[in-house]
Amino acid sequence: MMNPTAAMLVIGDEILSGRTQDTNTHHLAGALTGHGIDLKEVRVVPDDTGAIIAAVQYLSDHYDHVCTSGGIGPTHDDITADAVAAAFGTPIDVRDDARALLMAHYEQAGVEMNEARLRMARIPDGAELIENPISAAPGFTLKNVHVMAGVPMIFQAMVASLLPTLSGGKPLLSRTLRLMQPEGVIAKPLAALAAEFPDLSFGSYPFYSNGTYGTNIVGRGTEASELDAAMARLAALFPMDGT
Amino acid sequence: MMNPTAAMLVIGDEILSGRTQDTNTHHLAGALTGHGIDLKEVRVVPDDTGAIIAAVQYLSDHYDHVCTSGGIGPTHDDITADAVAAAFGTPIDVRDDARALLMAHYEQAGVEMNEARLRMARIPDGAELIENPISAAPGFTLKNVHVMAGVPMIFQAMVASLLPTLSGGKPLLSRTLRLMQPEGVIAKPLAALAAEFPDLSFGSYPFYSNGTYGTNIVGRGTEASELDAAMARLAALFPMDGT
């Protein structure tokens, strides 16, 4: 059986302008891989309603899950919740359950609720809330789209809340063999190995260290015994070399 | 006049599996912004010919420039050059100019040319080479698609080779105001300011530091005087606060 598939949609002008390095994709990729869900595509779009709607509709149609990051705060540029609702033609308004979470959090913190903060309680009809243990304002799941915060600490907490609720397949395993050989030497035997193990995938990642070229060969697959056999075969081709 | 637009296409299973944190997008985003080209979309796709072709065709149709990263080395998983050629129906084969660059480099390094390394001289008909001052194997520009290496040091060198050949518009300027106020307090005056300066964009990025919540407000635009006026107006609203 194939693993479920996922796409990531990162929303934010700050990524596209070069101000901010996105790290949420990398975190999500590792978490999904460990859970047996295959991340197949990532898109980054600006804070633009039309761009968000188009990406949500396409990705929701083509993958089992879509995770989004960014644009669910209290300011005017936080348009993700409304855009995701619009993508499915779902009504959205301040919802009592989300408002109650915020009220309890602000009361404890001695902070006033106001109109801007109330925006964070806008949740589409029928969506499930995703818990935010850090700053209370929840994410949500509408159909197969999981809407989460952009601040990395909060995004990671929401991923931790979300993942146990998703059915996973077989975790994708990987093994790395570090060879002090340039890619150009390894390429031919590696291609032969890849042809012999069609259920596995092999990536080749060159590096330069202490004045010499080397290559990390990463094998990936869901069957540990097959993966180990293939990597052992490869290591045997370069006996003096693996470290 | 509008600035030219660009999209980034990152190619590689290693990004989607969570093994590798992509940093090429962040580098390119900063370089394009400084050159007056607006990065409007990013996609990450696996080492899959169909996925690369579909993304190249879409992005090439919708943006002035497409920059790709990854998949142009000597190994079996390096399929970007052939996929980009296929996306435009352009023939591709080992090209004399690219082979000459590789031969000169390998001769100097005392390394043998072989079949795998020769793959890196596969360049589509009519494409312009992009110089690689580090390891010689060139990138190329086919129509409006600029194909570059995935290794960050080489990617950055290729971007430096490429950018001076592209017409830029007005560099997008940004100003940051750091306020020791949570987003929920700033949201309303910020929305009013954004409505008053429709040519500028304003992003709001919360942070948590030394036990208090603060917000970085980033204004962006191409006219320095207008941007400075708007940021001064905002700072005046929080007089005890800007740092």
Image: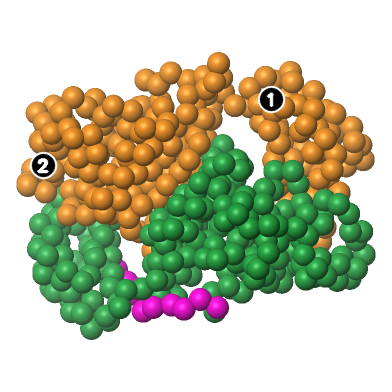
Chain colours: A orange, B green
| CA distance for labels 1 and 2 | 50 Å
Q: Are marks 1 and 2 on the same chain?
A: yes
For mark 1, give the secondary structure: loop
Which of the two residues, B132 or A240, is positioned nearer the viewer here?
Answer: B132
Q: Left or right of A67: which side holds B106?
A: right
State the residue in front, A129 or B107. Answer: B107
Q: Name the residue that disc number 1 marks.
A: A199
Image quadrant holding the N terminus of chain A, namely top right
* Sequence-earlier tag: 1 or 2: 2
Based on the picture, tell me whether residue B91 belongs to the magenta stretch: no
* Label 2: which secondary element: helix
Does B114 sit left or right of B211 as displayed? right
Structural crowding at the residue carrying mark 1, measured as other residues with C-alpha within 10 Å and reported as few (<14), some (14–19) or many (≥20): few
Residue sitting at 82 percent across and 51 percent down? B116
- How far across and how far down the image is residue A145, in percent? 32, 32
| Rendering quarter of residue B35 | bottom left
Residue A48 in sight in this render: yes
Q: Position of residue B119 (x, y in %)?
A: 78, 54
- The residue marked by circle 1 belongs to what chain? A
Q: Is residue B151 visible to the viewer in this orientation of the structure?
A: no
Q: Give coordinates of residue A88: x percent, y percent.
A: 23, 34
Report the front residue among B197 and B79: B79
Q: Quadrant of residue B180?
A: bottom left
Q: Residue at x 47, y 59 (%)?
A: B60
Pointer 2 residue: A118
The magenta span reads B165-177
Q: Is residue B96 left or right of residue A151?
A: right
Instruction: Tell me residue A68's x, y (percent).
Output: 35, 40
- Type of the residue with mark 1: Asp
Residue at horizontal 50%, vertical 61%?
B66
